[in-house]
Image (cartoon, rainbow, N blue to C red):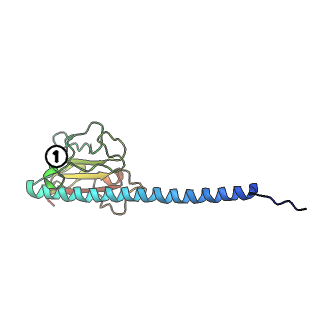
Amino acid sequence: MIKRQNGFTIIELTTVIVVIGILVSIITVNYLGSQAKARDSKRLTDAKAIEAGLESYRSENTGYPASSTATSGTTGEWETSGAAQPGTFLSALKAFGFPTGVPLDPKNNTITSTGNTYRYATYAAGISGCDSTKGAFYVFVVNNLETVSGASPQSPGFSCSSRNWQTEGDYVVGHFVNE
């Protein structure tokens, strides 16, 4: 008489568990990757909107808003969008398209965040080897894009003879008042 086995062997169960584990790993990686891409897309959209707001501000006020941490407009200390002790990060732009305030990083979207941030600084003419005839300028930086290592290919970059701000963030843009 032949005995019939009911159920699965250990090898069959192990094979099924391994296949399910691989599928879950693939799905998780793809999901997390798409979330990071969406956050980076939001960061770049925010950066372009802030840049447009800064240019609108300049056309109305013949200059860019001063960063609240800059001493007499010469030091260019960074003011961040998510620092624990924030300044008035681009608050002057509220009248130029940001009625609820400046956008915060989508991953660290509270004012007490210290990780991913948007940074802004203003500089007096001639600082860091920049051409003084171009006037004062600002630099805006997005830190820590999740899907690129180093500078984003979409970053316009900004540098003068004594300083390259592109090394200070993943997306960098700057403009002179007289340009």
Q: Position of residue 140 (x, y in %)?
A: 26, 52
Residue 34's image quarter?
A: bottom left
Residue 29 makes an appearance in the image: yes
| Residue in front for this viewpoint, 48 or 99 | 99
When the figure is inspected, residue 80 is found, relative to residue 15, above or below; the finding is above
When the figure is inspected, residue 2 is found, relative to residue 75, above or below; the finding is below
Q: Give the residue displayed 26% in from the left and 51% down from the top.
A: 103
Q: Residue furthest top?
A: 85
Q: In which quarter of the image is the N terminus?
A: bottom right
Q: Where is residue 98 in the image (x, y as percent from the top left)?
A: 19, 52
Q: Where is residue 107 in the image (x, y as percent from the top left)?
A: 37, 49
Residue 163 makes an appearance in the image: no
Q: Which residue lies furthest to the right in this view?
A: 1
| Residue in front for this viewpoint, 119 or 106 | 106
| Residue in front for this viewpoint, 85 or 20 | 20
Q: In which quarter of the image is the C terminus?
A: bottom left
Q: In this figure, which residue is indicated by the disc labeled 1?
A: 66
Instruction: Decide if residue 139 is on the left or right side of residue 15.
Output: left
Instruction: Decide if residue 23 is on the left or right side of residue 5.
Output: left
How many other residues sit within 10 Å of disc 1, few (<14), some (14-19) or many (≥20)? many
Q: Give the residue displayed 27% in from the left and 56% down from the top.
A: 46
